Image: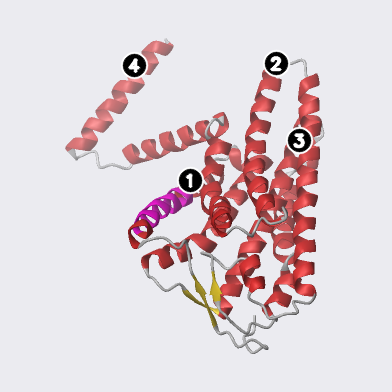
Amino acid sequence: MDSTNLTSVEEFVLLGFGIGQHNHLLLLIFFAILYVLTLAENITIIILVLLDTHLGQLPMYILLSNFSWLEMCYVSTTVPRMLFDLAVPGGIISFNECFIQFYIFFSLGGTECFFLSAMALDRYLAICHPLHYPHIMSQNVCYILVAVCWIFGFVWYLVPATLISKSSFCGPNVIDHFLCDSGPILSLTCPPLGKASILSQICLSGLLLGNLSFVVLSYGIVILTLMKTSNKGSRRKGFSTVTFHLIVVSLFYGSVIAMYLIPGGESQLGVTKAVTLFYTAVTPFLNPLIYCLRNNQVKEAMGRLLRRKGYDFVKHQDPQQPFCKKAHRKKRFTLTALSLETV
């Protein structure tokens, strides 16, 4: 991202949302709370998978913990800068900072596409090939799959991003957005745009349509398999899992395709900002809730972790302290009661 190219622009101005100062404060408070909650949710999932020996061995939750880390990186690429611009008027961002945000934003979005495909593959193997699933989707294979998602995610858009960064920017330098997105940046380049815009659209279309087709095909086969299953309990559990996965896929791909692939999707600035805000700030907040809200395994892991931490807290207290004596007496009473019930 060398600024010694043909450009005469050294910085950009992000106009943000174009609303009054009072509304700036409301948005700042709302999205600051949403950002903190998003980080807390995803950190909780990561900690559960790392500390719980049962979840840490399941490929689905290895993928989910990496997906949570991805969501934290994704939301941190745009929201802190947006909060800063809401708090400090001006919105000035340097040329290099803008293109770094642009490349990381698109790379993490591409990585999310690959992770959604990997999670669809995991559910396909688990439901359609349950006998071979432990051998095919071993922990080593799962970690390789995770590494492939991260590598492909940061490689697929490297060439278009480099070409766009080498384009000429003769001014103006005002971006009517709250982040450095491809459409507003390309609109500021001096004509002709050359191959950068075409290559960017080809790479973006190939990434979205290719991964979406794989996800739809995988879950389509899964749904057909579940419909043929005679075990009602397994069918209900399988449909519940697939439904939550499809909700996440629909939220992400629906907003991204409406933004980048539908003709005229970037023409209306108000709609553009609203859709971008949805998949950059709201979706990362909703995904952990959708995946884990009704997931019994996650709830059980949370219960095991809380019980273990509570036991460790009581165990390491000083018995000489009145509070600790009371805790120890309560613990002995509970154990005695359990022993009587067992007898």
Quadrant placement of the C terminus: top left
Pick whichever, 55 or 107, lies toward us: 107
Pick whichever, 342 or 73, lies toward us: 73
Sequence-first tag of 1 and 3: 1
Sequence-first tag of 2 and 4: 2
Query: Which of the labelled discs sits on residue 232, or is there none?
Result: 2
What residue is disc 3 on?
219
Name the amino acid, label 4. Answer: Ala
Determine the CA span between mark 2 and mark 4: 39 Å
- Tell me the magenta residue range: 25-39
Sequence-first tag of 1 and 2: 1
Quadrant placement of the N terminus: bottom right
For mark 2, does the 10 Å Cα neighbourhood hold few (<14), some (14 to 19), or many (20 or more) residues?
few
**Is there any visible trace of residue 130 in the rendered image?**
no
What residue is disc 1 on?
41
Q: Residue at x 20, y 36 (%)?
A: 323
Residue 338 in percent (x, y) is at 38, 17
What residue is disc 4 on?
337
Determine the CA span between mark 1 and mark 3: 26 Å
Name the amino acid, label 2. Answer: Lys
Q: Is residue 198 magenta?
A: no
Residue 248 in percent (x, y) is at 62, 41
Do the residues under discs 2 and 3 have CB atoms within 8 angstroms? no
For mark 4, does the 10 Å Cα neighbourhood hold few (<14), some (14 to 19), or many (20 or more) residues?
few
Q: Secondary structure at mark 2?
A: helix
